[in-house]
Image (tube, grey):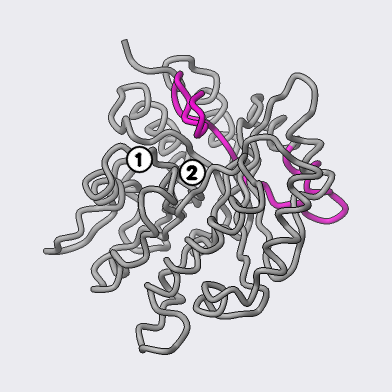
């Protein structure tokens, strides 16, 4: 892999797996690996408020002998401040605490998303503290502060929703912090018949759009606007389709087909959201049906999917 963790032999496969009942978060990751009969390349987790991360259990997963898992951290670093206040330095004490913890406890390369999916939190009113420019200023400040504090192992990810309704807003381009602050671009699509016409396969998942519009899908937009940046699905999930028992399994099969065909060469990581609470898609766990499990197992165990086409 490259210095910024771009794989040279096909995209990474990662997951967030929600633990339930007495299950620990680490148990949930290993349970998913057992279900799909394959190891995840990336373990995804979320932190906010004034949490210090990664906790010991997550470090242990990353460093488990013979596993070589990468971490992908989504972090909201505001510490109860607005984006504008963070950009002005009012959460520096928290950022510095986190930087000190990383220096002392975790020097492995990892993906770091700073406040994922900001679009629906934008308040374009000047002075709100939550304009798109406030967001990009906040993002740059956090990156600068971490770098100044000696955090040199973070690979920075700008994680959008990737939804047409936000992409057409006049302030949408202002969210982007700039090429020197963003190593990867991520977006978070879901597929489900309950989402209204979002059950048309993997190609539509990457480039969802409706009607006559200048927005032709997130994959197209980001590859056109920011050529050369590797893309990831920071979250993606597939719900079941009532009345179609094998629809989810066929969807997973199409993912394998499209990747093996090299249709989306800029897509370098897919991080699945394995949870019964998969946003509006409902239950996106891999094991909602025997057919879905078998299909995902076949995808993950095919060398042609996870390697460049000849």
Q: Nearer the viewer, residue 167 or 16?
A: 167
List x then y, in percent, for residue 292: 54, 36
Residue at left 36%, top 22%?
260
With 272 as the anchor, is 257 left or right in this view?
left
In this view, 296 is above or below 185:
above
Residue 6 in magenta? yes
How far apart marks 2 and 1 lie (CA) works out to 37 Å
Residue at left 80%, top 43%?
105
Q: Which of the two marks, 2 or 1, is nearer to us in this view?
A: 1
List x then y, in percent, for residue 189: 42, 53
With 265 as the anchor, is 33 left or right in this view?
right
Q: Residues within 10 Å of mark 2 (few under 14, many from 20)?
A: some
Q: Which mark is residue 245?
A: 2
Work out whether residue 237 can be spotted. Answer: no
Residue 176 in magenta? no
Q: Which mark is residue 147?
A: none
Magenta residues, start to end: 1-29
Secondary element type, mark 2: loop
Secondary element type, mark 1: loop
Q: Quadrant of residue 124?
A: bottom left
Q: Which residue is mark 1?
A: 229
Residue at left 28%, top 30%?
263
């Amino acid at each position: 892999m490259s210095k910024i963790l771009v794989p040279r032999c096909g995209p990474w496969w990662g997951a967030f797996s929600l633990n339930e009942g007495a299950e620990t978060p680490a148990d949930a990751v290993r349970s998913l690996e057992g279900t799909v009969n394959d190891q995840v390349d990336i373990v995804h987790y979320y932190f906010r408020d004034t949490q210090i991360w990664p906790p010991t259990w997550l470090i242990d997963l990353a460093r488990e002998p013979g596993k070589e898992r990468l971490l992908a951290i989504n972090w909201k670093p505001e510490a109860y401040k607005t984006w504008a206040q963070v950009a002005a330095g009012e959460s520096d004490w928290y950022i510095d605490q986190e930087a000190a913890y990383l220096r002392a406890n975790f020097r492995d390369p990892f993906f770091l998303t700073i406040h994922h999916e900001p679009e629906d939190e934008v308040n374009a009113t000047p002075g709100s503290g939550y304009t798109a420019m406030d967001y990009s200023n906040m993002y740059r400040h956090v990156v600068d502060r971490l770098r100044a504090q000696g955090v040199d192992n973070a690979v920075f990810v700008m994680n959008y929703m990737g939804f047409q309704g936000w992409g057409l807003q006049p302030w949408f381009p202002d969210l982007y912090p700039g090429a020197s602050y963003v190593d990867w671009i991520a977006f978070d699509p879901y597929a489900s018949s309950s989402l209204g016409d979002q059950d048309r396969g993997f190609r539509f998942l990457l480039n969802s759009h409706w009607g006559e519009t200048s927005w032709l899908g997130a994959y197209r937009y980001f590859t056109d606007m920011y050529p050369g940046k590797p893309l990831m699905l920071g979250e993606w999930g597939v719900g079941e389709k009532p009345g179609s028992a094998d629809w989810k399994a066929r969807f997973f099969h199409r993912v394998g087909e499209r990747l093996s065909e090299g249709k989306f060469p800029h897509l370098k990581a897919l991080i699945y959201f394995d949870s019964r609470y998969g946003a509006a898609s409902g239950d996106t766990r891999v094991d909602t049906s025997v057919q879905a499990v078998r299909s995902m197992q076949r995808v993950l165990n095919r060398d042609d999917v996870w390697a460049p086409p000849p």
